[in-house]
Image: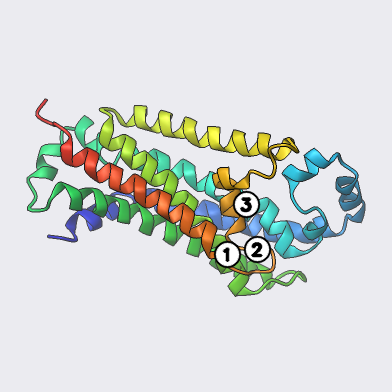
Amino acid sequence: MRGSIYLKTLHDLHAQTLAWSLGLALLGAANVLLFPTFQSMPNLIGFLEQMPPTIRAIVGDVTAMAQLDGFLRTKLFDPLPLLLAVFVVSQGARLIAGEVEHKSIDLLLAQPVSRRRIVVGKFLAMVTATVFMTLILVASLVICCRFIEGESSARHLLLSTLNGLPLTWFFGAAALLGSCLLQRAQQASMIVGGTVVGFYVWETFRLLSPSLRPYDEFSLFAQHKAGVTLAGQVQAEPILVLLGLAAVLLVGAVVAFDRRDLAS
């Protein structure tokens, strides 16, 4: 019975997980197969290098985009948490609030498991779904790299893809917290979704403003980008920061649901 909440939630997410896995696999394949075309346009790199510094700050390392690893980092790995946020926010907001809306919360609470195990089990199911999706993406990248001249090791592709998960889990934990606090899943989804957009807008303004650019420690997306360098080196500190923040929100969700009055 301990694992039933986890397995039931995982089962409920399986259709969405498979659909997202297919979509990410196709997106990864498209980016890899597009790279030779991009590489065959050297004037494009020169054009990007001549753009204003503020624009180049948003685009990323333009010179590195001439190599497959740099191209994938800019086009896929850096925005990956923002893509996955659509999944975890929409699904995470339903994990508890959805049970309340569908009047199935009483049946859920009738199970011989604590409220804390319910929250943790549901969160772990969402985590498992995101891990599965990213591994499918990695498999797609590794396979497609065999059909082009660009070189990228499977290890680098794996690390760069998995690096998107800590920030994704932070957004998922935020959605779960909202689901535990609010009556409707749509409310939680809109509030957390707006927060995600706010973090991204702040990152954009930070990159556009030379005076704000040094404050990368205050940007979740900057922390994400620092987790794995372009050379494939893992930086533990930013990853642990994001995991720690996600853990804090998860604890908040556990406490909120544990104290929530569902009598009404």
Q: CA distance from mark 2 to mark 3?
A: 11 Å
The residue singled out by tag 1 in the image is 235
Q: Nearer the viewer, residue 146 or 197?
A: 197
The secondary structure type at the circle numbered 3 is loop
Seen in the image, is 154 located left or right of residue 250? right
The secondary structure type at the circle numbered 1 is loop
Q: Amino acid at mark 3?
A: Asp
> Where 152 sits versus 93, above or below?
below
> Where 209 sits versus 153, above or below?
above
The secondary structure type at the circle numbered 2 is loop
Percent across and percent down for residue 221 are 58, 46
Q: Residue at x 48, y 33 (%)?
A: 195
> Where 105 sits versus 183, above or below?
below
Seen in the image, is 10 located left or right of residue 70? left
Percent across and percent down for residue 41 are 88, 54
Task: Answer with mark 1 or mark 3, whichever residue precedes in sequence.
Answer: 3
Q: Circles 1 and 3: CB distance less than 8 Å?
A: no
Q: Nearer the viewer, residue 202 or 136?
A: 202
Given this view, does label 1 or label 3 mark the residue nearer the observer? 1
Task: Answer with mark 2 or mark 1, whichever residue precedes in sequence.
Answer: 2
Q: Which quadrant: the C terminus?
A: top left
Residue 167 in view: yes
Q: Circles 2 and 1: CB distance less than 8 Å?
A: yes
Q: Amino acid at mark 1?
A: Gln
Q: Which mark is residue 78?
A: 3
Seen in the image, is 91 located left or right of residue 207? left
Task: Answer with mark 2 or mark 3, whichever residue precedes in sequence.
Answer: 3
**Mark 2 neighbour density, 10 Å: few (under 14) some (14–19) many (20 or more):** some
Q: Which mark is residue 122?
A: none
Q: Amino acid at mark 2?
A: Thr
The residue singled out by tag 2 in the image is 229
Q: Residue at x 13, y 44 (%)?
A: 108
